[in-house]
Amino acid sequence: MSRKLASIQKIVNIEPIEGADKIEKLTVLGWHIVASKSENHNIGDLICYIEPDSRVPEIPMFEFLKDRKYIVKTIKLRKQVSQGLVIPLRELQKNFNIDIATLKEGQDITDLLGITKYDPEGEKEQKLAEQEMKKVKNPIHKFLMRYKWYGKIYTQLFVPKNSGFPQWIKKTDENRLQTMPDEFYEIVNNPNPHEVILFDSTEKIDGQSATYFVEKHKILGIFDQYEFGVCSRNLRLKTQNNSSYWTIARQYNIEKVLMDLLKKNKATRIVLQGEIAGEGIQKNKYNIKGYKFFAFNLIIDGKKHRTIEMQNILKPYNINTVPILDTERELLDTIDKMVEDAEGKSTLYKTEREGKVWRDIGNNISFKVINPKFLLKNNE
């Protein structure tokens, strides 16, 4: 499911901000947003909420974001952290000619407003794909590519499947806690003491998400064939190159590791996912020389292992997991407390940690909580 960068939501709370006469704090879903009192917001009003990391269109309505390159970022006003934008529905009608009478709570209007995700790593992925296509310079090939029949054959046989992320592997982007308040409070307010859900938490590393896999196939129903794959967050990178993804594959001998684990477990499919950090990646906040890999998922024939189990499995292969911060812990009782709990220093280096990822494997529940101090420090 694509992320709702802009959606119709309800204002669930309004609070004053100490020492501020013209602004107030609104709560939408689990987010806090600073807004002008002149907009006359009321609890229960439907509004358009635009999430952080959104890139809005360059139109007069969003001119106030010009200095931020039209990107919605986490900011602080009068000591109050503000994440996202609240837009009155009348502004949608005025600036986008939208019939607001048809809008419903929860409706995704990202595409309707022309909003896209600000995604520097995704832009790097796209450049990788473009580089692969530019390698083909044969003039005969270029001529024949005018014909659909040739294009289909060439694509099937020769083109690196950079856009073909395996459909059987789930991509690695976790939901932010603030987008799922109903699910969160259903867990923490469960009155049955025998149904307490315990979570593990790990440090969220600010890097590049990578996926590696081995899949066993049968040839003619008799012979075993093994396929090794390297993927960025969204793309299959079939051709070996000097990107961080392939460099990590060679540095940690990941194909051999996965083959060994596949055979030990008599499995058909095995997936290793993790974060790459180091030089040239997200400003190298952890001061790493070269690249390092931190695993956060090990999935063998569809079974996902707890991080502590994965740590024991990967240790003999000298592959680290993301740092484990909590094991079998109950969630705190409010989203605000969970956000405060995400604050702290990284275990990798003397800097703010990006946040925490919480998981309960048994109930297939997971989400991330981002440290606002990290976002403010890094202008994100």
Image (tube, rainbow, N blue to C red):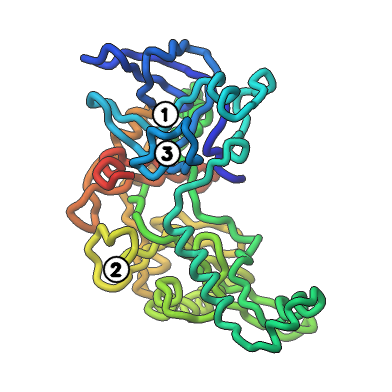
| Between 227 and 304, the one nearer to me in the picture | 227
Q: First in sequence: mark 2 or mark 1?
A: 1
| Between 203 and 101, the one nearer to me in the picture | 101
Say which element carries label 3: loop
Kind of residue at disc 3? Pro
Identify whether 32 is placed above or below 286.
Answer: above
Q: Are marks 2 and 1 in contact (CB under 8 Å)?
A: no
Quadrant containing the N terminus is: top right
Q: Position of residue 202 (x, y in %)?
A: 36, 50
Q: Which residue is mark 3?
A: 52
Give the residue drawn at x 58%, y 56%.
170
Kind of residue at disc 1? Trp
Instruction: Find the distance from the CA under tag 1 to the CA under tag 3.
Output: 10 Å
Give the residue drawn at x 79%, y 84%.
220
Give the residue drawn at x 60%, y 85%.
137
Horizontal side of 139 relative to 66 (left or right) equals right
Q: Which residue is mark 1?
A: 31
What numbered label is drawn on residue 127? Answer: none
Q: Which residue is mark 2?
A: 279
Q: Residues within 10 Å of mark 2 (few under 14, many from 20)?
A: some
Horizontal side of 181 relative to 140 (left or right) equals left
Say which element carries label 2: loop
Q: Which of pointers 1 and 3 indicates the residue nearer the eye?
A: 3
Q: Are marks 1 and 3 in contact (CB under 8 Å)?
A: no
Quadrant containing the C terminus is: top left
Q: Are marks 3 and 2 in contact (CB under 8 Å)?
A: no
Whether residue 193 is visible to the viewer of this picture, yes or no, is: no
Q: First in sequence: mark 3 or mark 2?
A: 3
Identify whether 38 is placed above or below 253.
Answer: above
Q: Position of residue 350 (x, y in %)?
A: 17, 54
Kind of residue at disc 2? Glu
Instruction: Find the distance from the CA under tag 2 to the CA under tag 1.
Output: 33 Å
